[in-house]
Image: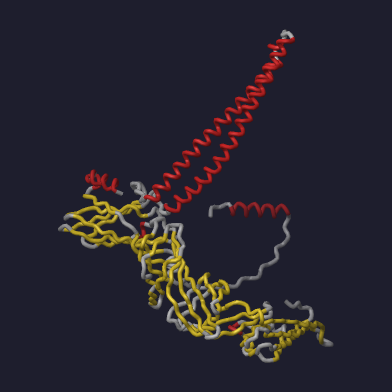
Amino acid sequence: MRSFALVLWLFPSVCGADIIALSSEVTAVRLYPQGASIVREVPYQMPAGQHELVLTGLPRSTDLSQVGVELTGARLGAVTGRSDYVPPRDAVVDQEIQAAKAEVERLEGVLRRGEAEVSRIGLESEAAQARVAFLRGLGAGAPAAGLDVAALRDLAVMIGEEILAARQSGFEAELRAEAAERALSETRAALAKALQALAALQTEEVAGGVQLSLMASSAAATEGVVTLSYTHYDAGWVPTYDMRLDQGAGRLVIERGAMIRQNTGEDWADVRLTLSTVRPSGQIEPSEVFGWQRGVIDPPQAMPRQSKHLEMDSLSRLGAVAEAPMRVADEAVALAAYDGLAVSYDYPEAVSVANRADSLRITLGKEETEAEVRAWAAPLYDATGFLMAHIRNDTGALILPTPFMNLYLDGRFMGQSRLSAVIPAGAEADIAFGAIDGLRLTRSVTRNAGDRGMISRSSALSEEVVIEVENLTGQDWPVTLFDRVPYSEQEELVIAWQARPRPRETDYEARQGVLVWDLELLAGAKQAVTLEVGLEWPEGKVLQ
């Protein structure tokens, strides 16, 4: 950054005004479920007159169309943004990064020298193999012709000794090459770790960037603050909840939290953080409803059979038409605010989130509410009942959807679930806390089918369903039992049913045919529910 400022000051005539280079860091972030409004507050000083304030170092991915600029202490003129042909940004290098870079360079040098040594040893092995081939050719070639016995013996001894020495030399070279290659494997592993350590220290993008030039003027020497705000969509937060149910007291403690991540190209160090439920990346405007024109046409007529020649001619014409152009933060609690449209949380402490690397969890507060504990049973699908906590959201704040809802029952971790819909203030909801293994469910079906009627024949089906709920838990349980009977929207299909005992509700939450019973099941007790269902439809029809 300093070298760039020096260049600007040396050539003010090129830029047309005295230039003051400023450096900036992120100071505040307003984080949405998808996206973030990022703020940089940059103090400056300047003499009287007109000057150009130049800020570099914004991430390459900054959207210049969404950059807002405010200036105190002087009059703001034209603002110019540049994303290409920007002087390189000086990376902030501290001692840890310098040490990590030095270790990477050292290991790269060791690796280069080791690979060169392996190559040199390979050349020795190749030379030994070449000597062996030459000596074998020497013994079988013309130089041996015409020699007497003694000379041939001396030649054979010499060739044998030289071949042995060459082979020994090649064997030793292969052993040294294997040892050197093993050492290289260790060096490569150490280099990979060193590169990983360096990447952990260098999370920000330092290549490229965006530059902003602000024309400012003042009648006298002044000082003030430049405030930049811009939006980046590769960041966000997700609510988390620790749901802690005290079954005996009938109380539910809701511990709110948030998981934060960002990939904006820059690290956030000690920034003021506000979380908001506003979704700037979602739908902003209501959908528009257009008129719906209906009409009637004559039913399609069967086309007369054409000759094959005419059919091919028609297809060729159609073809011609078709071708026409067409990490967890220290414990601190955020202050929530609700304005009727959205909820925002101002976190009381500065936070740091590294680009691409950190996943930070913060605490948003704790509420407590009454909970009615019951067992829900759906024997059509399940063999056991499930513990449910029925609550009314009297916390005064929204309970937001989340994939991260940790469930605790009497201090024991029961598992992780998800909350698929928002629970507004004052609304009721049911939260599951796991299976009740001692609450056994069975469901048996007896079915009969046949024909009825002597003149007008029809088909019929009847079945009897027996549901049993057995309490082997050693404690009394209020049980909400769910089952179903078929329903029909056709006059031809007649359905009649009866239940013993009668259900409390017959179309639960507007789901036709879904039945609900409220049972009080004492410890060790068993209760049965019987359903009788009859279906009748005309002969020749098929039941679906």
Q: Which one is nearer the viewer's eye here, 110 or 343?
A: 110
Residue 202: image location, x then y, percent: 42, 52
* Residue at 72%, 13% in the rendered image: 153
Q: Which one is nearer the viewer's eye here, 544 or 232?
A: 232
Res 488 visible = no
Where 507 falls versus 366 (above or below)? Answer: below
Res 474 visible = yes
User: Which quarter of the image is occupied by the C terminus?
Assistant: bottom right
Q: Which one is nearer the viewer's eye here, 421 or 544?
A: 421
Residue 183: image location, x then y, percent: 55, 40
Residue 355: image location, x then y, percent: 43, 57
Where 81 falls versus 191 (above or below)? Answer: below
Q: Residue furthest left?
A: 220
- 435 displayed left or right of 26: right
Q: How is the image coloured?
A: secondary structure
Displayed quadrant of residue 344? bottom left
- 266 displayed left or right of 437: left
* Residue at 32%, 54% in the rendered image: 81
- 433 displayed left or right of 285: right
